[in-house]
Image: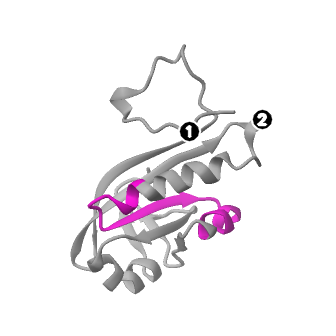
Amino acid sequence: MPILSTFAHSDLPSAFSWQAIAYAALIRVTVFHAGTDYAIDGVGNVLTATPYRGQGYGRQVVERVNDRLDTSDADAAALFCAPDLEPFYAAAGWSPCPGGTRVDSHLYSELRMMRMLSPRARAAAKSLLTTTMDVGWAW
């Protein structure tokens, strides 16, 4: 049975001593939206190796990410995914953002989903979820 472990990037074990079957990365970005700077923890590169899909490993990784986010000092968390993954992330507490995302002045085709973490992000949730958010790059 695989073991679920969390590592800081600098603490990853040697590639010769382990095999990742599911993975996610977190990166902190600052996003200026509707006149306010928000600390956003971007979730990226969520994946499960093909032979292990459908066995709950991706769900476990997202649950671990959510636990980490819930104890962070970020205002919100955001991720980008294909529209068919919306039910997967929604089941884990993520909300779709129909307002879309603009990356370097171009509308980004991937679905943005968010979790509001701080009181000020929760107060601004309607704007954060429903209006277009400008980001410098899509992590």
Q: Quadrant of residue 111?
A: bottom right
Is residue 104 visible in the rendered image? The answer is no
Going by the numbered disc 2, the residue's amino acid type is: Pro
Q: Quadrant of residue 1?
A: top right
* Frontmost residue, 126 versus 33: 126
Q: Position of residue 96 (x, y in %)?
A: 55, 74
40 lies above or below 12: below
Query: Residue 74 lies in magenta, yes or no?
Result: yes
Left or right of 44: which side holds 74?
left
Q: Which residues are magenta?
A: 68-90
Residue designated by label 1: 4
Residue designated by label 2: 51
Q: Residue furthest top?
A: 16
Is residue 44 visible in the rendered image? The answer is yes
Going by the numbered disc 1, the residue's amino acid type is: Leu
Q: Position of residue 32 (x, y in %)?
A: 26, 68
